[in-house]
Amino acid sequence: MEQGPAAAVGTAGAVGAAAGASAPAAVAAAAAGASSSGVSAGYCPVPLPLSDSEQQCYSELFARCCCAPATSSSSGHPPPPAEVGRGAPLPGPAATAGANQVADLLRASQLPAETLHQITELCGAKRVGYFGPTQFYVALKLIAAAQSGLPVQVESIKCELPLPQFMALKNDSEIRYSNTTELHGMKCQIPYVTMEKNSFKRVDDGEKQQEKISPVMSPVSSPPSSPSNYQRVPLTYGYGKLRSGMDQMHAAPYETRQHALQQEGSTSGSHGPKPTRRQTSLIQSLSVEREPQESNSNYPDDPWRITEEQREYYINQFKSLQPDLSSFISGSLAKNFFTKSKLTIPELSYIWELSDVDCDGALTLPEFCAAFHLIVARKNGYPLPESLPQTLQPDYLQTAFLKSKWDCALFDSYSEPMPVNQQPRDLNRIESSIKEKTDLTAPAQDVTIDDKQALKISSVDEAMPKDLSVDTAAKPGLLPPPPALPPRPFVSQTDQVSEIELHPQLTRTPSQTEESGSPVKKDLPHSQPPSKPIRRKFRPENQVMENQELSSVTGTSSVPTVPTVKPHAPVQKQSSKQKKAIQTAIRKNKEANAVLARLNSELQQQLKEVHQERIALENQLEQLRPVTVL
Amino acid sequence: MAVCIAVIAKENYPLYIRSIPAEQELKFHYTVHTSLDVVDEKVSAMGKALVDQRELYLGLLYPTEDYKVYLLMPNGVSYKCKKLLIPCVKSMFPNQLHRYGYVTNSKVKFVMVVDSSNTALRDNEIRSMFRKLHNSYTDVMCNPFYNPGDRIHSRAFDNMVTSMMVQVC
């Protein structure tokens, strides 16, 4: 079983080896490595010692890097002029952390190119071809080591290091944050600049958005050219000020949101750096708006509080194991399920201990949710508590569940796996105007602000199916790795895709959506914004579609206008124009279809491979399971 | 007061050993191991007659060296605890270790080593301690991630044992 070797990894050199091992092992190693070393109760051997702050930082960074699909950076973002130490882009496809984002992150660390190459090699990303959580964390640690002047070696990451610093590209000196600002500073260092109009929209939608968790790092907007994110300096300083005053929880959602917004804006290519002050003030206003709202709804600073989305996700998972919500999940069933989370057995055992309060060897729904939540927390690097937190107690959860029953009902209707095929979406987005995307994403970002959980979700999601691309996971029929909570980033995507599904133009996406498994994960975000975003999206979606049509009609008059022109212009001219327009539209659609079909086949291929891997792993597990003797 | 608490599996290997002066663990290993012979002796002596409805509380095994050894053989997952009541031999030597034993249906044994210098614990107290141990052990068994035969790493179990040992001391 992968966890065995992963848990046993304890030597410095093994970190790289673990990274080089198969993805599940890497995930397990990452999970093991994520547990803090002596700071909190290190429950399992820690190959990569990370302090609390480091864990949180890295997991957030990782989530940030992973949220956006690794599509090629759009041509829209201008390379930052005054940059120092820009490394060459990382090789390999980015199945997990987006290669572009990671590349940008590495560049933002302002280390020389050779160092970055060394780091990439050491962390194992080159070997495995992608940046899994292990590789990413190791890379971050190596960056911190390099920035502290230590040689870039595996040994240097064993010691306590300050957090790596990342300069905003295109930056001014103000961006340089000392390590003392720690997490907050760290987070800020990754500049997220919102485009002006985006920020405006955010303010408009601020209220709605703030009701929900923000995870949104989504690539909803098209080709997330991650480099652009790091190029937008101005905000960082503002962020720094802001963040240091805010709870860490609050910070991340902003980053994520900003990230998403940037991504939206970046594609247009027309966004230049905006004045810091303005955005800072906007952000501040957002944060101010946020906090009061947060206080009455979710409690983002409480990692042990289950949000609505999470609850519904857990309930959905429970249903998949046990259709009767008032009954139990047996111990063996739950064991199989939670083992997929790739946490070590001792940790899972401890989580079980915490959550099974009546010690009957079975999990009721509240117990299950508590256990799931603990697993998610653990995967995001939070040390397990000594005792079950009050918000995870079954009686507490019971009352909460009754309240949210209606959410379940709503949730069920959206529980159909949503596609997370980002590439086709990206294509669509490219075709459509960015503005429409913004409209779509803004409402879509209506998720609770609990960014920590957002991070969890995205990072967990990334951690889980390491060998899968971000888009795919097991089929809905197969249980996707449990802790892979729906990445918030994908909320808008999924919503958008759901809209797309409705639209006849993009008939391919539904098929893709059915197949990709991470849809199940995406269900969660749907729950909270089920009615609102969907409804809201109808309108923008129509607009999107319209815009798509519009965009597809290149040069010629827009389709809607064509009919109007008809009666006035000569019939022949009009008909030819119309023909041209239609033909262009047809051509565009065909291209889109072709691309989508190709992507679909690729993803299915990946899916098959993952299935096989899974089967192989399960066989191994069966063989390795000790024969129980009583 | 219990200076050492041990859980021995059916095959006579330790699942869990915990002692108050932690550095003397090896000594306690020996102590507990030697007491296993006594346990087996007592268990075989009992035969089938006492199999039903009685907790396998073996009581004081024998005073050796400094400690009294109490042997407890829990029943494992069985809900019926069986105790074998065995007359305790009071130690005549001060500062001796007394070992008490308790056996369960599944032949998992609990051994408790107590410092007799503290006012001798009454039998009932020992029994209640064993009962608590047994319950905690059952809870550990209920955890699907625990494979019978593994060492016990449960934190809840640890906490319970610690509290017992601390209170006794």
Image (cartoon, coloured by chain):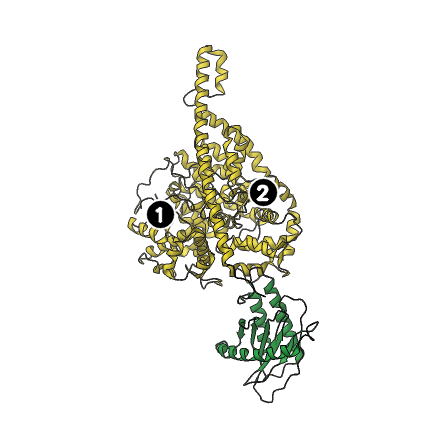
Taking depth in this image into account, of A622 and A17 the one nearest to the observer is A622
The label number, if any, that marks residue A377 in the structure image: none
Name the element at disc 2: helix
Considering every residue shown, the one lying at the far bottom of the view is B92
Q: Where is residue B23 in the image (x, y as percent from the top left)?
A: 48, 77
Report the quarter where the C terminus of chain A lies.
bottom right
**Which residue is tagged 2?**
A527
Taking depth in this image into account, of A256 and A232 the one nearest to the observer is A256
The mark that comes first in sequence, 1 or 2, is 1
Residue flagged by tag 2: what amino acid is it? Ser
Letter of the chain that mark 2 sits on in the rendering: A
Residue flagged by tag 1: what amino acid is it? Ala
Vertical side of B25 occupied by A539: above or below: above
Q: Which of marks 1 and 2 is in front?
A: 2
The chain drawn yellow is chain what?
A
- CB within 8 Å, label 1 to label 2: no
How far apart are the alpha carbons under marks 1 and 2? 36 Å
Taking depth in this image into account, of B61 and A461 the one nearest to the observer is B61
The chain drawn green is chain what?
B
Taking depth in this image into account, of A431 and A322 the one nearest to the observer is A322
Name the element at disc 1: helix
**Which residue is tagged 1?**
A108
Residue under the image location 56 percent in, 72 percent down? B8
Residues indicated by labels 1 and 2 sit on the same polypeptide chain: yes
